[in-house]
Image (cartoon, rainbow, N blue to C red):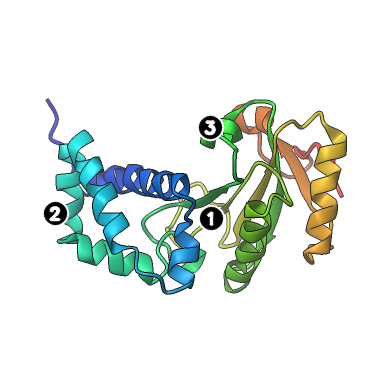
Amino acid sequence: MAEVDPEALADVAYGIFEHLLNRNLQAQGKYLFALVEGGIDFKPDLAAIFLKFSEEYPQLAEAMLSHFSSLDTIYQQLCDGEGVVPIKTTQMYWIVQDAPGSAPEAIEDENAGKWLIFQEPDQVDAVWKKVRNATVALELGISAKVSTAKPNPDSRDNRKVVYVYTKDWADEADVLRVREKLRELGFVDRIGYKRNIETFAGEYAKKGKRVTYYSA
């Protein structure tokens, strides 16, 4: 049996843990970004959720503690913006914010799609905050996510991208409603909307080929 790379295992462990952290906080009516930005102590929540994680995934919990040295280190990184501020996030390729009541797996449905907002790294934090807050306020679609500072081998340039998801690409009224709200938030330049079915098929824009379904 091949030996497991400790760094790779720690990466996987952190990804699963952060997903559980956000899910458990939201089940209590809390949001990680609100706790961090409000300077609210959430160390007891973190400890309780990590205990549950370590009971369910002992090997992954051990890998995390081996990598970060302690839960206090993880807590401090979160307080410093890890998982909240795109340019300060280095453990995950994406920060995801689901709308209240939306299932996390909804963005993986082949009927879903997303508006794509490309931004320079020095602008993405402010852009993400607008989109995230509007998503939580149920003003946009089912979810949103943003690329982070973690180097992504799939990126084609140094720009960051914000995805704003809608439930059904065929529901043109809802797709355009979300686009209009994005205009109200200040995103007035033309942007494209890509269906998940193109993403799942591995189709990406290139010279002479457009893969966006809507453009507005």
Q: What residue type is labelled 2?
A: Ser
Query: Which of label 1 and label 2 is nearer to you?
Result: 2
Local crowd size for mark 3, using a 10 Å CA cut-off: few (<14), some (14–19), many (≥20): few
Q: Where is residue 70 in the image (x, y as percent from the top left)?
A: 16, 61
- Element assignment for label 1: strand
Q: How far apart are marks 2 and 3 (CA)?
A: 30 Å
Q: Where does label 1 land, which residue?
A: 147
Q: Indicate whether 49 appears above or below 197.
A: below
- Residue 84 placement, left or right of 156: left
Q: Residue furthest front?
A: 28
Q: Mark 2 points at which residue?
A: 66
Specify which label sits upstream in the sequence, 1 or 3.
3
In this rendering, is residue 29 above or below 204?
below
Q: Is residue 207 left or right of residue 24?
A: right
Frontmost of labels 1 and 3 is 3
Counting from the top left corner in percent of width and height, residue 147 is at 53, 55
Under mark 1, the amino acid is Ser
Q: Quadrant of the N terminus?
A: top left
Residue in the picture at 29% in, 69% down: 76
Q: Is mark 2 on a helix, strand or loop?
A: helix
Residue 154 position, x and y percent, is 50, 46
Nearer-the-camera pick, 161 or 20: 20
Q: Who is closer to the viewer here, 143 or 163?
A: 143
Q: Name the residue under label 3.
A: 105
Which x, y percent locates residue 22?
43, 49
Q: Residue at x 14, y 30 (%)?
A: 2
Q: Earlier in the sequence, mark 1 or mark 2?
A: 2
At label 3, the amino acid type is Glu
Does residue 61 appear left or right of residue 128 in this picture?
left
Marks 1 & 3, CB-CB < 8 Å contact: no
Mark count: 3
Answer yes or no: is residue 208 visible: yes
